Image (spheres, rainbow, N blue to C red):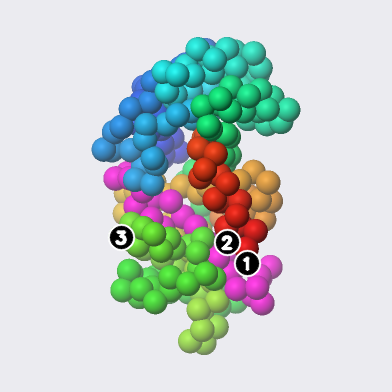
Amino acid sequence: MTNQDVLRIALRQSAIDSGCSSEDFLSDANKVVLSVNDPQARRYLKLPFFCDLTSYGSNIVASVSAEVADDVERYIGSFPAEYCFETPSVYVLNDILRPHGMRVCFMAEYFLPDVETLRPLDCPYEMRLLEPADFADCYVPQWSNALCADRKHLDVLAVGAFDGDRLIGLAGCSADCDTMWQIGVDVLPGYRRAGVASAVTSRLAAEVLRRGIVPFYCCAWANVKSVRNALRSGFRPTWMQMTAKSDEMIDGMICAAQR
């Protein structure tokens, strides 16, 4: 699989998720489409979107509800693409969304593997490839980035780092769609800054690629340590995405985070 193959697969999946064509992300012109349900979309997405902005760097594809299509088209036409994903411009988008009981919620950067440089990295600990039965007892808070308790059926593969019999680092991947698996990673506090995260992440990514699937990595762009891990592990930033959610959902997330 080449880097061109990897990008082509990602573009095709983004087109399914957004309800557009792959070529729309490579145009210099912005595109606004009405969001629709699609059974081939990433399985954790709640479609249709009310407002979702995706950019591979050249433009923005906005997948939206008809209620805000015209306003969002004006918004993405008022600023350079990168400005639409950051403050203070994003406050303008929130003003558009607020009368509909919505606000900007998820803001993330997505990474794809550079197959020409990605190599399994080492760390001072034993590493093991794990199948679902091997990590069935790991759905606990310390592994909540590597595994998702709400979607256990999607967690298909993992790489664990062990200090003796103790699991100290875990990268897991979920089968979010047929062609792409998402990688998440956790390392216990006492074992960080020792290369464990990049070791388990890179080894899992290589194993996923070996199976003919594209691994991808996602994090908030303010999560510097996660971005660094992505880069060390052989991933490169490829697209960004920003999604609106209801006031009720956002308020619930804030309350949960403050507990």
Left or right of residue 168: residue 173: left
- Percent of width and height locating residue 234: 55, 51
- Percent of width and height locating residue 83: 67, 25
258 vs 107: above or below: below
**Contact, mark 3 vs mark 2 (Cβ under 8 Å):** no
**Contact, mark 1 vs mark 2 (Cβ under 8 Å):** yes
* Amino acid found under the numbered disc labelled 3: His
Comparing 52 with 156, the one in front is: 52
Comparing 22 with 35, the one in front is: 35
Between circles 3 and 2, the one closer to the viewer is 3
Query: Which residue matches tag 1?
Result: 195
* Amino acid found under the numbered disc labelled 2: Ser
Query: Which residue matches tag 3?
Result: 153
Specify the segment rendered in magenta: 172-197
Residue 59: numbered disc = none
Query: Which residue matches tag 2?
Result: 198
